[in-house]
Image (cartoon, rainbow, N blue to C red):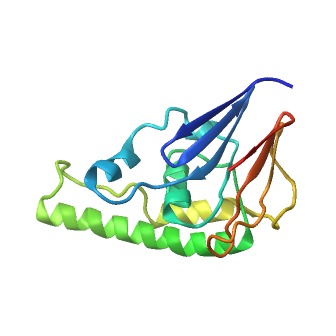
Amino acid sequence: SGTAAFIRQDGKFLIRTDGTQVLVDAGLFQGVKSLRRRNWDPLGFPAPALDAVVVSHAHLDHCGYLPALVRQGFNGRIVLTGDTAALAEIVLRDSAKLQEEDARYAAGRGFSKHRRPKPLYDLDDVERTLPLFTVVDFDTEVAVAAGISARLPTAGHILGSTSPVVTVNGATMAF
């Protein structure tokens, strides 16, 4: 028993109960500069306080912020399907490489207000993220954290995609 709060925040959905925090998706903003800058905004909660992340699919706007969470101290489980894990590995490595290249280019051309522009995350952050992946089968109920479970039914969006169904203290929410 206990109370639960559901907080939607820019490509992320935080579920907070008494002492437990789970994120559903961890998306990265792309596109125009004003959107990309939002990736640098404070989360509103400390990343190390997260118990787990449930990922619906491997598009960057749903999984692209994972290495940034790890860089900030998150070290919990990342729950996703096998196909999503395989695709996310490729997507995250590519994203890190592009961010590193963009930071070097900005430094070389003086496009940044920062003396030494840095990427939001790099390949090392991705390599620390991948071992946190916890692969689960479609439609199998799995305990994610204390009082929180998830089931990942297939969504048919892209390979491995799901529409997570999360149960918190007996209440169920579909994403």
| For residue 23, above or below residue 161 | above
Quarter holding residue 168: top right
What residue appears at the point 58 percent right and 69 percent down from the top-left corner? 88
Question: Left or right: where does residue 166 sit relative to residue 69?
Answer: right
Question: Left or right: where does residue 95 sit relative to residue 101?
Answer: right
What number of labels is visible? 0
Q: Where is residue 120 in the image (x, y as percent from the top left)?
A: 39, 54
Q: Position of residue 91 (x, y in %)?
A: 51, 71
Q: Where is residue 62 in the image (x, y as percent from the top left)?
A: 55, 58
| For residue 162, above or below residue 87 | above
Quarter holding residue 82: bottom right
Q: Where is residue 48 in the image (x, y as percent from the top left)?
A: 60, 40
What residue appears at the point 84 percent right and 62 percent down from the top-left corner? 139
What residue appears at the point 51 percent right and 54 percent down from the top-left corner? 27
Q: Pick the residue in front: 20 or 61.
A: 61
Question: Left or right: where does residue 133 sit relative to residue 70?
Answer: right
Q: Pick the residue in front: 105 or 35.
A: 35
In which quadrant will I find the N terminus?
top right
What residue appears at the point 54 percent right and 33 percent down from the top-left corner? 45
Quarter holding residue 117: bottom left
